[in-house]
Amino acid sequence: MRNRLPSLFRAAVVLAASLLCLELMLQAYVAVIAKRGKLFDYDVETGWHTLPNLDLVRLNAANQEWLIKTDASGLRTLSNQVAPDRSNLLILGDSFAFGEGVMLEERFDAYIKRAMPDVNIVNTGTPGYGTDQEYVLGRKFFKSLHQDDVILVLLYVNDFYDVLRKEFALRSKPYFIREGNRWQLRNPEIGAFQWLRDRSYLIAVLGQLFEAPPGAAWDFDAAQSIVTHILERIAAEKPSSVPVVLGYHGRLVGVPWPPNIQMSELCTRVALCIDLDPSLDAKTDFLPDGHWTPSGHKSIGERLAGALESLTK
């Protein structure tokens, strides 16, 4: 055994050095060649958040440059706070709401702003978020809302998978667990690994490789119940005069839409429910990764603007 210790030690050193070299090569490739610089840090409430004060050029799935600028709170938004003297639109969403792959002025809410210039828009969209994380982030704004304001929840097909996860690509996230007949919200399990996860591209790559793909065994009855519960929570925590609009989409991009999800039932929980897929052209409105192109954002923005204008008249 003693004779083997030096060999084991050398092997460990070589392995550690190899992993370090691989990590440095990945970081250089991601930052310089792929232009996919660091976006996130871990968060004890939402699991992760977009970094504040970003000014970053990235390449989208079509190999086109787009610019990410975030404010001091880490939001890529037209406004980062509810205005007390104006009507407000609070948007809860994921990478579609964030505008993955497009410039800010091309994003769907820029078209809402053009149609409704007097409305203050607070877009909390964050890449990778499920409806549970969107709720956790959005609730910070609920008490500031007032009459004539609106909450818009963008629901993507992947949310029915995401609300069942305790982590996503090795990032811990908040999740709901059933206790008796009630759903209880649990905080993300943040530890030293999460700190390391947000600083290592090697771990990030491994997390994406081993992530359970949509289409595996999922309890979609639970997913429907969780999303329903989240909508009920939003209704209970917001001012009673503030309507909730649900815009849902995702049948056109290849992620299996769960056959037992009852959108008609979910739509009874909100003031207005909008199927966004008919507004999209499958040939022109999607990037290779399934996110909306500028023309897709334009279609969605104009569809939502028309619906919101009719709601607020």
Image: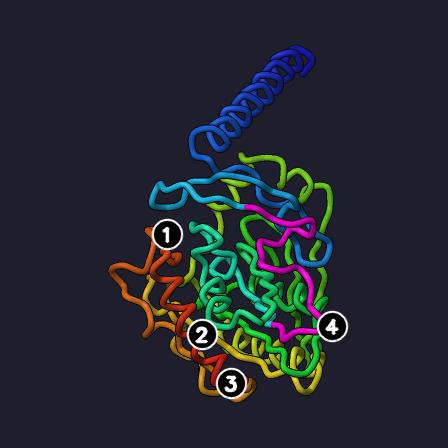
Q: Tag on residue 304?
A: 2
Instruction: Specify the amino acid type for callout 1.
Output: Asp
Magenta region? 69-88
Q: Nearer the viewer, mark 3 or mark 1?
A: 3
**Residue placed furthest toward the left:** 283
Q: Secondary structure at mark 1?
A: loop
Mark 3 or 1, nearer chain start: 1
* Residue at (43% x, 50% y) in the render: 101
**Rounded to the nearest whole Å, what is the CA distance between mark 4 and mark 1?**
36 Å
Q: CA gap, disc 3 to disc 1?
A: 33 Å
Say few, some or many: other residues with alpha carbon within 10 Å of mark 3 (under 14 / 14 to 19 / 20 or more): some
**Residue wearing tag 3:** 311
Residue positioned 57% across, 46% down in the render: 69
**In the image, which disc is placed on residue 289?**
1
Residue type for callout 3: Leu
| Residue 171 screen position, x and y as percent | 60, 50
Q: Work out which quarter of the rendered image holds the N terminus and state it.
A: top right
**Whether residue 87 is situated above or below residue 6 in the rendered picture:** below
Sooner in the amino-acid sequence: mark 2 or mark 4: 4
Name the residue rendered at 58%, 63% in the picture: 123
Quadrant assignment, res 200: top right
Q: Which residue is mark 4?
A: 144
